[in-house]
Amino acid sequence: MNAQLQPTGSAYFIAKETESAEKHTLSVLVDNEPGTLARVIGLFSGRGYNIDSLTVSETEHEKHLSRITIVTRGTPHVLEQIKHQLERIVPVHRVNDLTVMARELGQERPLERELALVKVAGTGNARVEALRLAEAFGANVIDANTGHFIFEITGRVSKIEQFIAIMAPLGLVEVCRTGVAAMNRGPQGMEAGA
Amino acid sequence: MSNAGSDAGRREMSGAEMVVQALRDNGVEHIFGYPGGAVLPIYDELFQQEEIQHVLVRHEQGAGHAAEGYARSTGKAGVFLVTSGPGATNAVTPLQDALMDSIPLVCITGQVPTTLIGSDAFQECDTVGITRPCTKHNWLVKDVNDLSRIIHEAFHVATTGRPGPVVVDIPKDVQFAKGTYTPPQQAPRTSYSPKVQGDIEAIKQAVALMASAKRPVIYSGGGVVNSGPEASHLLRELVDLTGFPITSTLMGLGAYPASGKNWLGMLGMHGTYEANMVMHDCDVMICLGARFDDRITGRLDAFSPNSKKIHVDVDPSSLNKNVHVDIPILGDVGRVLEDMVRLWRATVKPEKSALHPWWEQIARWRSRDSLAYRSSDDVIMPQYAIQRLYELTKDRDTYITTEVGQHQMWAAQHYGFEKPNRWMTSGGLGTMGYGLPAALGVQIAHPDALVIDIAGDASVQMTMQEMSTAVQYEAPIKIFILNNQYMGMVRQWQQLLHGNRLSHSYTEAMPDFVLMAQAFGGHGIRCEKPGDLDAAIQEMIDVKKPVLFDCRVAALANCFPMIPSGKAHNEMLLPDEATDEAVANAIDAKGRELV
């Protein structure tokens, strides 16, 4: 975008990026058919875009529609390109930049939640401390015996990160995270459109 | 093409029959292809019918480029049929070529039976995986009852919006299976609906801005050609109404006639001085169906620094991609031109005298004569060869294709195109070997036309085998080879950037093209002297066979004018300034280190 340049002396011109990168959450409504997710991911890798988090599941079974939530990072110009490039994919119905929409609604960011399963093994004080902290974080125990717990915790990404960090010295064994699910506040929904 | 929801046209048939029936129902008359194990049922159906003519190529890449030439010269989708595995992988180059140049192609590939997919079966490859990034869309058909719908959808996606290539991958068991055929219906999928009508408020703003311009320029591209003949007609009308100067990208040549009085010539890296200076100094730029490619803009931070920019494009991702524009208009360029012309007529009082100072400035730039070259009586200058070819073919029904390199740029600079769809070249991908099979495709579509591939000696050897196809189908394509024994454009860059170290850009063992033509069953001509050129070109035109014309040109001629890397439009290297020293120093040492 008319950015500062250095002559490279090659057949190409390399632009120096002057805008700073932002983190945005995109919601992409797609036909749930073979290859759609590969198209979306291939677009990101092929054009050098970043994916911080990606979740996908069919959300409307009768219409075979899936909703993909992507957390990505880029300059405003790149983010606009990502949106348009996604819209070009034939089975993509609609792309919403939830971060932009949230700002338009006067909010800092969209509602974002993640679920994590956290396995912690240990005995004695560490075990007691892990359980106490889990209660403080509102995590549920979904499996346990005398030597371990599996906690289920839901919340913002920052909360999950914090919980995992705290569990690390208390016998953390493994973690599984879903990635971010997101939508905007207010009564409006995301429709497939025309 | 209607009867949505009715049972009319629904019939039981095999998958292979469906393929042929669907091609017929989509108006296909010719397909290019190569048989193999995984498409034999379809070939068996082709054998038993007469409506669709199949052209047997010698390599699948040739089939794809032939389909591209066919598509570009007719405005219809080009269709090609290849087998699984290597057939599909050989199709990748033309698919990517068509993607970058927005050419509608439908590629049908055979696949191993569904039960064997994933087993590393003989001639298996992940065709939809390999072709996903080089197609507009692709499909693997797993159920014969989806097959006809998918083929109809494939034609719809390929030919609408920003056109592009699509692949339909059909496993062999689906070709044998019986199912229900449904005719094309007007109920396209809901997720795909390209916006063709431009926003009228934006168009009004654009017309108002155009009316206020003192130094305007129209910069048109391949989108105008793709939009159909009406768009080219409207473009000419807009130029006449406004009196604006017009330049075009490589892909857009012919949309406005080269003989038109407002024509500036092509712009960009090897464009004319006047076209690039106009782009640099303009106050209003109207970009119609072009995409601010890096060969066009040169150095981006110095690209047309003082202009307001209007950009019309059917692809939203092209708007504001490389260059920030003031008035983006999303829509089909033909439809938008219709509105522009109408609004201009209704709201603008023509005051063409306001543009006089601008045209006077343009005349000064033009007088620089940036396409000049040193003529010679001893050796054929490549520019001279193109000029003579133009003079001797311009009054005929002529189509030109090219390969990629210096000859391509010389053809764009020195051959005058008067109509759209007459110029087939590989722009975005820059595919050496495009021109010969593309010429074949054009000739199949226009059997009585004069079809010439302006070629280089290196490029033409990449797909030379299709001469055999041309002989088989009595397609009298003319391959006009500017033979300098070098990969000329590679050499030019080595001279510019790499201290004149000509690493592997010279062909030491050049084949004898005349003997080669004869070996294929075509006609060979060699010409070495400027004085013999006209007669030799006339011979080429008159021979009713495929011709390889070995035109021996000045070996070390380079292509100018040129915008060197890292330079702006107003820093062109002009032919009379392009001494050896100037060429060697055109890109400074600091720039070279950054490569």
Image: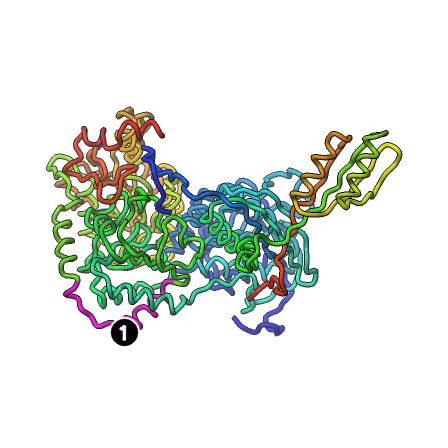
Q: Position of residue B50 (x, y in %)?
A: 49, 60
Q: Nearer the viewer, residue A57 or B471?
A: A57
Which residue is rendered at x = 33% and y = 59% of the image? Answer: B310
Q: What SS does tag 1 mark?
A: helix
Q: Which residues are magenta?
A: B333-354
Question: Magenta region, mostly helix, strand or loop?
Answer: helix
Quadrant of the rendered image containing residue B284: bottom left
Residue at horizontal 12 percent and vertical 50 percent from the top: B364
Residue at 46%, 51% in the rendered image:
B32
Residue type highlighted by circle 1? Thr
Dot 1, crowdedness within 10 Å: few (<14), some or many (≥20)?
few
- State the residue in front, A162 or B222: A162
Q: Is residue A60 left or right of residue B480?
A: right
Disc 1 marks which residue?
B347
- Residue B494 image position (x, y, % from top left): 29, 29
Q: Nearer the viewer, residue B18 or B568?
A: B568
Q: Residue furthest right?
A: A146
Tag 1 subunit: B
- Dividing the image into 4 quarters, which one contains the C terminus of chain B? top left
Q: Is residue A161 visible?
A: yes
- The answer to whether residue A81 is above or below residue B581 is below
Q: Is residue B518 left or right of residue A128?
A: left
Looking at the picture, how far across and down is residue A183, in whole percent? 63, 56
Q: Is residue B342 magenta?
A: yes
